[in-house]
Amino acid sequence: MLPLNDAGMLSGLVCGVLFGWVLESAGFGSPCKLTGQFRLSDWSVLKVMFTAIVVAAAGLLGLQAMGWMEADAVFVPSAMLAAAAVGGLLVGAGFAVGGYCPGTSVVGLFSGRLDAGVFLLGLLLGTFAFAGLYGPAIEALMNAAEVMAGDSLPEAYGVPAWAVVLGMAAALVGVFVWGGRFERASRGPVTATEAVEGSAS
Amino acid sequence: MEKSSALHASARPVRPFWSPLVAGVALGLVLLLTFVWTGHGLGATGATTRLLAWLGMVSAPSVTAANPYLGPIVEGGHPLSSWISWQVLGVALGALVSAFWAGRLRVQWDGERSIGRARRIAAALVGGVLAGFGARVAAGCTSGLGLSGAATLSIAAFVFLAVFFVAGLLVTRLVKGV
């Protein structure tokens, strides 16, 4: 029965190498390409993330439907909505200002970008500040607006999982169509050559 | 190979990026493999948090152990000995090999051509601090909560991603960081 629940060194290294390889190949080591999503001139971030979410969600659903994987066997983050919203706000702002998110800054550094190393240093400082300020006030914020009925959309609101995946697949088509229009109406996606040269965006 | 540019750490010809559809399907399959193999998804800031806890233990052990956030992390043994540390090490290796192989490995201050080096360094630092703090509030970042959580249809993941994109759209219009 799946999942194998193997949390050893080998699974970490193998999944990590594949993750880093795909992110770099998508162009996600380049801050110009990544922030192109927010300038609406390069929709690669939304296209890639959304496609991956639909593929993985459909895969999990398929494995459960075939009886190969137990339902609710994989980790689902708790539905702490205030924490998710405040965190999303800060990570989104940090992405727009710094040019990376935490995972892609590792990809940036290991494709030679020194500014990504500075971003990583900032991540450590931000974590340090959080640990220093951590106490009842932050805990109260993090525990606010928690959905008690469940952590996932099907669990909390009774929406069938296949309907959520189907809805996301439909939205994905929209992302490709609309994103393509925005890309054609602007400078368009950052190419590998531009990214390597550190193109002025 | 024949044209070696002084700018490139690897003198290989620059290969184009994968199309977003190909990269997205590949990323989805890697994420699915991770779920099937380990029972959870991919991440990033779990490793930087553990790195900070380790740095704390090396430089100020009593303060770190007494800290209400870092203390519980160091109690469970060596802070770096965890799945997420190996996974992030893997990300570094995978990115390095991929960038080298495709002629995309180049040592540079990316973004300095548009805003200058000093401003680029300041922006990267400030952005990192914001993202590092935010990822602790949300107990996850774009990978760990946004990507991996959304694949499990997590409500918190959808809220995170929605606010993340709106914040990014707005802040990009106010600050030029790259």
Image: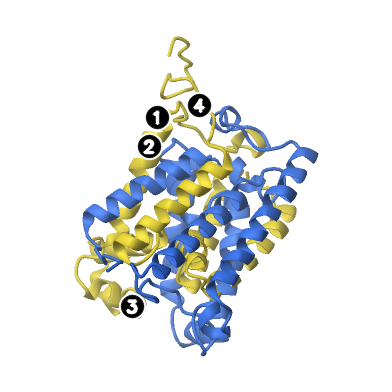
Whether discs 4 and 3 lie on one chain: the answer is yes
**Type of the residue with mark 4:** Arg
Label at residue B96? 2
Chain of the residue that carries numbered disc 2 in the rendered image: B
Residue B14 point in image, percent of width and height: 50, 24
In which quadrant will I find the N terminus of chain A?
bottom left
Estimate the spatial distance between the alpha carbons at disc 4 and disc 1, rounded to whole Å.
10 Å
B14 shown above or below B89: above
Q: Label 3: few (<14), some or many (≥20) within 10 Å?
A: many
Estimate the spatial distance between the alpha carbons at disc 4 and disc 2, rounded to whole Å.
15 Å
Residue positioned 46% across, 70% down in the render: B136
Label at residue B100? 1
Q: Secondary structure at mark 3?
A: loop
Residue positioned 63% across, 36% down in the render: A190
Q: Is residue B77 left or right of residue B5?
A: left
In the picture, one chain is yellow; tell me its letter. B
Q: Which residue is mark 3?
A: B67
Residue A183 point in image, percent of width and height: 73, 41
**Type of the residue with mark 1:** Phe
User: Which mark's residue is nearer the viewer, 1 or 3?
Assistant: 1
**Type of the residue with mark 3:** Asn
Q: Is residue A130 left or right of residue B120?
A: left
Estimate the spatial distance between the alpha carbons at disc 2 and disc 3, rounded to whole Å.
35 Å
